[in-house]
Amino acid sequence: MTVEQILKKLVSFPVLGGDSNLSIINRIKAYIESFGIEVTMCPNEDRNKASLHCRIGPAVDGGLILSGHTDVVPVKGQEWNTNPFELTDIGDGKLYGRGSCDMKGFLATCLASLPEMVKANLTKPIYFAFSYDEEIGCLAAPELVEHIKTTYTEKPKYAIIGEPSLLEPIVGQKGIYVLETHVNGSAGHSSRIKQEVSAIHEASRLVLWLENKMNDLIDAGRLDHRFTPPHTSLHIGKFNGGIAPNIIADKASFFWDIRTIPMDDVHDIVEEFRAYCRTREDQLRSVFPEFKIETIENHPSVPHLDTKESEDVVSLIKKISGNSKLNTVAFAAEAGQFANGGFQSVICGPGSIEQAHRANEFIEKEQLIKGMEMLENLITEMSQPNFK
């Protein structure tokens, strides 16, 4: 099958983040197994989702993982000119469909390259590692990484995460942590604002604390100019509270995220925020004893990626991609999780992130061709007797 034929099939599976991905993952599994490759499944606890991994080539140390995710973001509310779950070629050199860019284009290049990988005389193995629920917080990757480490007696050395980068090597990504904060105050007549504790007023103070914390980090010179913006960002995306203008709100909540540059520790920031919350509780419980601020994890934190230029994977990705310019991204991906698992990791894949998550998502045919060329170069490199 050609890369376009494979991509067409992958796009036809409308598997959103959070949905069961068994339809697409089982189809991928069957395709890989048709080449005589043993596939290992890594299911979730409910067994309605699964990641998979497999090894092509010899069971020796020093191999490379090609990593991607099988889920996509929703299309509801977007104005598409074509069926988002049918890969469409309108003759402009682009292939339209949800996930065509993010990131089924990369999966298609991996699967289309599999016959050549099987035929090649690889001296180091190539692994596939395909996950679920990346689009709702990179939820499956940590377990997938650990599963790979415990399944194989040998140890892979590298990982390429094929997020769309126009095949430019990405050596850094920001981490992300999404939280929600709930404030429990006391209801009452709005004229009694000093005798009650407004949950909205207190939640607003917390929001301002977070904004000031971001500005304090900037003022302290906590900057990494490889990123845009070059600092850790703290952002409130959703705020709820109150039932009427003349009623003091007893409940308020907001959802927020932290996107950290590598030099900042997300858990230090959260702990400092919690300490401020405890201070506010101590001050206001004399007014309302049941005043409480609770901050909970909306989904687990995703670590940053900070691959050093001196690492071997950097010279490898430059060579096989044909691009020597290194870049960073502000979005989160599974690369930091693979790096934390002990694999030298980079992001590099076909397509542009500018097309991801929007209506009429597309990947250029030329990008698919270049993606195939990158994997052909990888096969050649990993067939060398002296490949390290």
Image (cartoon, helix red, strand yellow):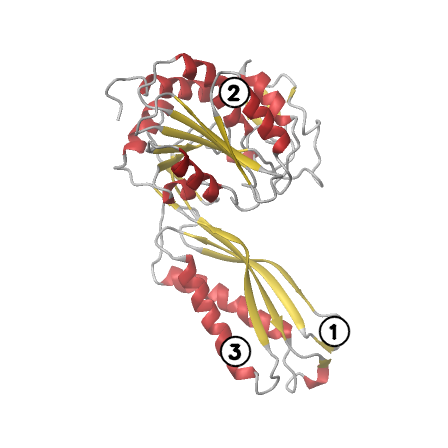
Could you tell me how far apart the alpha carbons at marks 1 and 3 are, in whole angstroms? 24 Å
Q: Is residue 382 above or below residue 143?
A: above
How busy is the neighbourhood of tag 3: few (under 14 within 10 Å), some, or many (20 plus)?
A: some
Helix, strand or loop at label 2? It is helix
Between label 1 and label 3, give the one nearer the viewer: 3
Q: Is residue 292 left or right of residue 192?
A: left
- Please identify, in this view, whether the residue under mark 2 or under mark 1 is nearer the observer: 2
Q: Of label 2 and label 1, which has the lower sequence position?
A: 2
Q: Are marks 2 and 3 in contact (CB under 8 Å)?
A: no
Label 2 crowd (10 A; few <14 / some 14-19 / many >=20): few
Separation of marks 2 and 1 at Cα, in angstroms = 63 Å
What amino acid is at disc 1?
Pro
- The secondary element bearing badge 1 is classed as loop
**Label 3 secondary element:** helix
- In this view, the mark in front (2 or 3): 2
Residue with the mark numbered 1: 245
Return the residue nearer the eye: 75 or 34.
34
- The residue tagged 3 is 280
- Viewport quadrant of the N terminus: top right
The answer to whether one can see residue 93 in this image is: no
Sequence-wise, the earlier of marks 2 and 3 is 2
Q: Nearer the viewer, residue 215 or 181?
A: 181
Residue 356 percent location from the top left of the image: 56, 35
Residue 216: x and y, percent? Answer: 40, 65
Give the spatial CA distance, label 2 vs label 3: 59 Å
**Which residue is painted at 40% across and 63% down in the image?**
268
Q: Which sits earlier in the primary sequence, circle 1 or circle 3?
A: 1
Please provide percent x and percent y for residue 286: 57, 87
Residue type, numbered disc 2: Glu
Amino acid type at image mark 3: Arg
On residue 33, the disc is 2
